[in-house]
Amino acid sequence: MLVAAGVGFVAGLAAPLTLTLPGGLASAPSVVGGGRDVGLVELLETVIRTEGEMLTFNDAVAELLGDAQDEETAFAGIAAAAASASDELTELRPVVVEQRGHPAVDDVRTAYLPHLDAWIDYLSALAERPELLFADEEQQPFLLDINATAADFSDALEALLASDPVAEVAQLAERILDDGFRGMGADAQV
């Protein structure tokens, strides 16, 4: 997921999670053929879960900033939301790491892990120093890392799509790209 850095917090991403799994894949990944495709579906489903945590964090921050009565309350809420999201992403990271096998799975996993780690680093920093959210200069290295790794992951998904994967894999990859990695406009820092 790209981060738009224009407003001090992760603006432009505070949208509800709209990723859905086509064709009942969440309950029956065996509908795709072969180990490569099952591995890709499982990996992309995990990516959807991690991206959902990032969006949940952004939603929580947007709500906190709208509802906070004072700076102390806002900072405490940001720190708590960041710590929670960091913990969730840290718990999901081994699931991404465990996805191995076919080169396509390895390529996507290898491209996604730095992006996931960039988010974990950013959220961990916000959990310790929530005021970082409003310190553009100090926040910038985190946002640049998130966006650079998002670009690399996006390239890996585009390469996967160019390999003509089965329809279910293509739908998941397209949805991930459309919901978090495409269309961020000129304000995106890649």
Image (cartoon, rainbow, N blue to C red):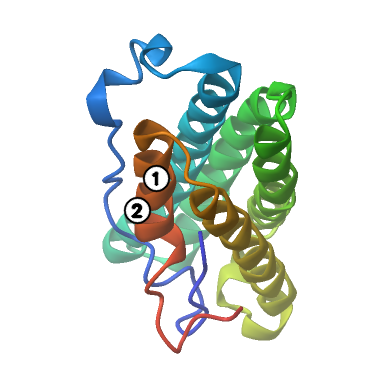
Secondary structure beneath disc 1? helix
Q: Are marks 2 and 1 in contact (CB under 8 Å)?
A: yes
Q: Quadrant of residue 142?
A: bottom right
Q: Position of residue 12 (x, y in %)?
A: 37, 71
Task: Give the distance between the C-alpha atoms of the residues marked 2 and 1, in whole angstroms.
Answer: 5 Å
Q: Position of residue 147 (x, y in %)?
A: 62, 69
Residue ID at (44%, 46%): 173
> Compared to 122, does 38 lie above or below?
above
Q: How many marks?
A: 2
Name the secondary structure under disc 2: helix
Q: Is residue 40 left or right of residue 28?
A: right
Q: Which residue is mark 1?
A: 56
Q: Amino acid at mark 2?
A: Asp
Query: Looking at the rendered structure, which numbered label has been put on residue 17?
Result: none
Say whether residue 146 is left or right of residue 15. right
Above or below, 71 against 46 in this view is: below
* Residue extending farthest front: 164
Q: Amino acid at mark 1?
A: Thr
Residue 87, horizontal then vertical, whole percent: 63, 33
Q: Residues within 10 Å of mark 2 (few under 14, many from 20)?
A: some
Which residue is located at x 58 percent, y 81 percent? Answer: 189
Identify the residue shown where x is 65% and y is 43%: 108
Residue 59: mark in rendering: 2
As rendered, which of 157 and 70 lies closer to the eye? Answer: 157
**Residue sticking out furthest to the bottom:** 186
Please determine whether, in this image, residue 135 is positioned above or below residue 169: below
Is 8 on the left-hand or right-hand side of 23? right
Most foreground residue, 75 or 40 = 40
| Mark 1: few/some/many CA within 10 Å (<14, 14-19, 20+) | some
The structure residue drawn at horizontal position 71% and vertical position 43%, both measured from the top left corner, is 107
